[in-house]
Amino acid sequence: MVNPTLILGLESSCDDTAAALLRWEEGAAPQVLSSVVVGQDAAHAPYGGVVPEIAARAHASRLDSVVEKAFSEAKLSPGEVDLIAATAGPGLIGGVMSGLTFAKGLSLGLGVPLVPVNHLAGHALSVFLEQDVPFPYLLLLVSGGHTQLLLVESVTQFRRLGTTIDDAAGEAFDKTAKLLGLEGAGGPAIEALAKDGDAVGVELPRPLLGRAGCDFSFSGLKTAVRQRVEKGDASAADVAASFQGAAVGHLLTRTERAMTQLAEEGAGARHLVAAGGVAANMTLRAGLEGIAAHHGWGLTVPPLRYCTDNAAMIAYAGAAMVRAGVGPTPEEAMGLAPRARWPLDDTTNATTLGAGRKGRKV
Ligand code: KG4
Ligand code: ZN
């Protein structure tokens, strides 16, 4: 396949339906022409969490209008696209199925090749939408569904250094917000309330203290917060500030450990990248700046619109795969099944799509 220059990206793995158009000329920086993201908060609100069936139906009914909007914002027509990149997993299977099936139909109808993309590869490479960073780099991916430390060696090679053994970081923020009865998105609500609280006002456990490796755990913290809220003797602001301090402290400790491990191995990584919705957190950002400066590493945190789920990162990752000459043939792509589970370091080549061993939190 010749290098694609106009790429349509599609994303539907969780509760955001997204489409984006990316122009990426040979020898030039990629340019996001449009990036449309339609959330489903209202549809899931009555249930206190994302309901997979509702999500799948919402994606199926919105994909065409979201794609149309991406084209109209970019002032382009579908006939001009030369690659379609769609999330093929990991994620909620109904949503992934909706998006991938839509992409296959579009690919057949337009006669344009389709490349299936691992959602995590999209996050891992999203930094390139705004800035060039040197390989290999260490990625801290922290969102509502994922908490991972990855060594990104190339656009197709990833080594997982750590993952959560229970809840994702964003999930812990969301559950804490719910316990405190906060309205709206959990992470930002905790961050706002924490400003009025004392970060050491409520004693909380330090997860995996003394445990070797770079894995994460948030369930002990969540339980301790629940017990403290039930006891009713601490202010909500102090609970929020203390939780945020403990969660961010844990993320920073494990990230720093991964940096030390990579330095000891002589892996050559000197740059840290953060991605995922939790990377919006200012306490985390300040902490990352601190450890990067301390170790003499570079740090890049992409703008929030590329940290959270979006289709521009999927378009970029798909095009990068095609440029690197990996991935399935157009015929194979048509036959690929969506994957609920698809660990990133398990698969450097989308032709090996098959049954995954681990879930989207890993
Ligand atoms: O990447 P994202 O939009 O969706 C996926 O989960 O894939 O991340 C959403 C998560 C939510 O759990 C949300 O509470 C968290 O990111 N988040 C934050 C902040 N903003 C969003 N967590 C902490 N502080 C924030 N400012
Ligand atoms: Zn995501």
Image: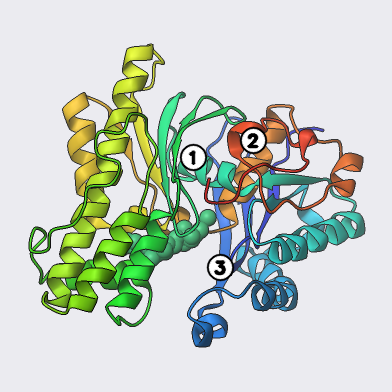
Q: Earlier in the sequence, mark 2 or mark 1?
A: 1
For the rendered model, the colour scheme is: rainbow
Point out the residue furthest to the bottom here: 46
| The disc label shown at residue 37, or none | 3
User: Disc 1 versus disc 3: distance between alpha carbons?
Assistant: 19 Å
Up the image or down, 292 lies above or below 103; here it is above
User: Disc 2 versus disc 1: distance between alpha carbons?
Assistant: 10 Å
Q: Point out residue 308 in the picture as x, y percentages from the top left corner.
A: 46, 58
Report the quarter where the N terminus lies: top right
Q: Is mark 2 within 8 Å of ligand 2?
A: no
Q: Earlier in the sequence, mark 1 or mark 3?
A: 3
Residues packed near mark 1 inside 10 Å, few (<14), some (14 to 19) or many (20 plus): some
Q: Residue at x 42, y 28 (%)?
A: 137
Q: Residue at x 31, y 37 (%)?
A: 254
The answer, for residue 227, to whether it is visible in the render is yes
Kind of residue indicated by mark 2: Ala
Q: Which residue is mark 2?
A: 320
Q: Is mark 1 within 8 Å of ligand 2?
A: no
Q: Residue at x 67, y 33 (%)?
A: 347
Q: Secondary structure at mark 3?
A: strand
Q: Which residue is mark 1?
A: 128
Q: Secondary structure at mark 2?
A: helix
Up the image or down, 48 lies above or below 311; here it is below
Q: Nearer the viewer, residue 204 or 2?
A: 204
Left or right placement of residue 239 versus residue 182 in this view = left
Asked if the residues shown at circle 2 and circle 3 are in contact, with their CB atoms under 8 angstroms apart, the answer is no
Kind of residue indicated by mark 1: Phe
Quadrant assignment, res 56: bottom right
Asked if the residues shown at circle 2 and circle 1 are in contact, with their CB atoms under 8 angstroms apart, the answer is yes
Q: Point out residue 44 in the picture as x, y percentages from the top left corner.
A: 55, 81
Kind of residue indicated by mark 3: Val
